[in-house]
Image (spheres, rainbow, N blue to C red):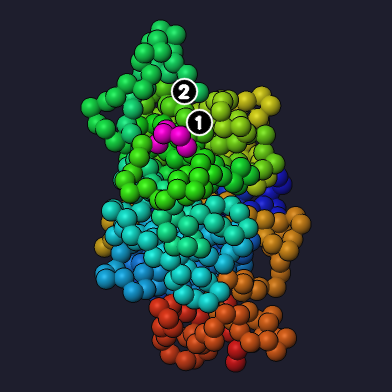
Amino acid sequence: MSETESSPLLVSCGNSVRAFKFDGAEIPVPLSSIYTNAHPTTARWYPNGRLLAVGLTSGLIAFHHHVELECIGHINALSGARSPSAIHCIDVTNGSRFLAAGTDSGELNIWDMKNSVIVNRFSVSGPVQSVSFQHTSDSRYVACSSGSDVMVFSRASGRLVDSFTVANEMVSLGSPSGTPDDKAGSSALHRPSSSSRAKVTAVAFSSHAVNLLAVTDDSGCVNVWDVSRTHASRGGAAPQRSSKIGTGATYSRFTSPLRTPATDLVFASSTSPVGLFVAGLDKHIRVYDKSLRRFLFSIICSAPVTSIAHCWDDLHIAAGHTNGETSIFKVNFAAKSAEIALSLPAVSNQSSTDSQLPVSTSVRSLHFQPQVSGSTDGQVPSTPKVPRGMPVEDPLDHEKGKPPYGRNWPRGPCCNQGQNIPVSGAYVGHACSAAGALRR
């Protein structure tokens, strides 16, 4: 990929939100007043590449437009909650209509961004560490993790479809593909450890095999689960108790030979020659084949990896590290090798949004900007447009004399109407200059 404007932005979230071009240039992310006394916890692009959602410790989600990354508004993701709680994870459906936000108080809220209402509220026993929508036209399922448990909910019915507890099974010196080592013998496989449970670190639905859900945990295991074989899809009722992964729904299972925690995973695109990337604290990114049944090779990093992101060009993979640095690798799948293309330094502590807030050194989340919708080469349009799915007026609809997309949202400070006004639990800040000008 040439180092031009057509290159996607890589957004990282640690003790601040940062955006980088492929030439290493850092793009400033303007912060609004909602970042006061709150710091970012996770950042994720919308599938159309036009909007960046940033979760905050205050329970708000800020939205930044892809042009100059200006903050154009925010919502209270915890509307109706008993107490404020930090946002841990965010995911957005393919059509950009629904947004899921998981919190450290054990709430998973599903927002209908078109109508600015929470359509589903799910409660789990602990902090929601990871969330993922199924990549189908109706986004039928949403999966999340809390502690050792993985829950799959139906977005349409608002009910629990299935839940599983990940067992901490110490696999001694097995190959990365999960087969027993010749010296250890098959009897060493699935040997119970002193701890019966492992903590889930990430969940993600496959973008091409839509029924497959991958789960990583702190024992180094990767479980790939087929949600089409859940209790509900088999015609039965949702389980009353959690069952152990591997009781009929497991599609495949991999283990880390070093048995260090797996920290993050990401599925490759449907056009990629591989299927899955898994990061770990052993400084490795493991690459698995498209069938998700065979280990291919490892990318060795300079520091333990806490988060990863795969670029839609199918050539680059980014790794965030415990020391705050970020590495971008160019991968040669035919040669089963990777070379470092760019190394991005850690941010200084002074750049945190508030000096009184705790500073986390590690990179908690990474995400490459998807191709901008309406463009065949990913080039950023010159005219700003507030994307559909954002709770502010669409300036192009305004020009055509149409009513605002969704509800009649109040004008923000850019329209000289004072402070943000709550509407059905949502809060709208100022829009970009183009939308603001059209509103006046």
Give whichever of 160, 387 is nearer the camera: 160
Q: Main secondary structure of the magenta part?
A: loop
Q: Give whichever of 327, 277 is nearer the camera.
A: 277
Check whether the beta carbons of the residues at disc 1 and disc 2 lie within 8 A of each other: yes
Q: Looking at the image, tell me whether mark 1 or mark 2 is earlier in sequence order.
A: 2
Position in image of residue 321 (x %, y %): 43, 41
Dot 1: within a 10 Å radius of its alpha carbon, few (fewer than 14), some, or many (20 or more) residues?
some
Tell me the quadrant of the picture where the C terminus can be found. Answer: bottom right
Q: Is residue 331 left or right of residue 71?
A: right
**What amino acid does circle 1 point to?**
Ser
Image position of 430 with respect to 96: above or below: below
Write down the quadrant of residue 258 in the picture: top left
Query: Which residue is at 47% across, 28% downward?
Result: 254
CA separation in Å, label 1 and label 2: 9 Å
Query: 156 or 31: nearer the eye?
Result: 156
Corner quadrant of residue 356: bottom left
Tell me which residue sits at (36%, 13%) in the image.
187
What residue is pinned by disc 1?
252
> Which type of secondary structure does the marked residue at label 1 adopt?
strand
Residue range in magenta is 245-249
Q: Residue at x 76, y 57 (%)?
A: 376
Magenta-drawn stretch contains 322: no
Question: What is the x, y in percent for residue 275?
Answer: 60, 36
Q: Is residue 28 left or right of residue 280?
A: right
Q: Position of residue 161 (x, y in %)?
A: 44, 52
Q: Which mark is residue 167?
A: none
Badge 2: residue crowd in 10 Å (few <14, some 14–19, many ≥20): many
The quadrant in which residue 192 appears is top left
Position of 391 with respect to 220 (left or right) is right
Residue tagged 2:
178
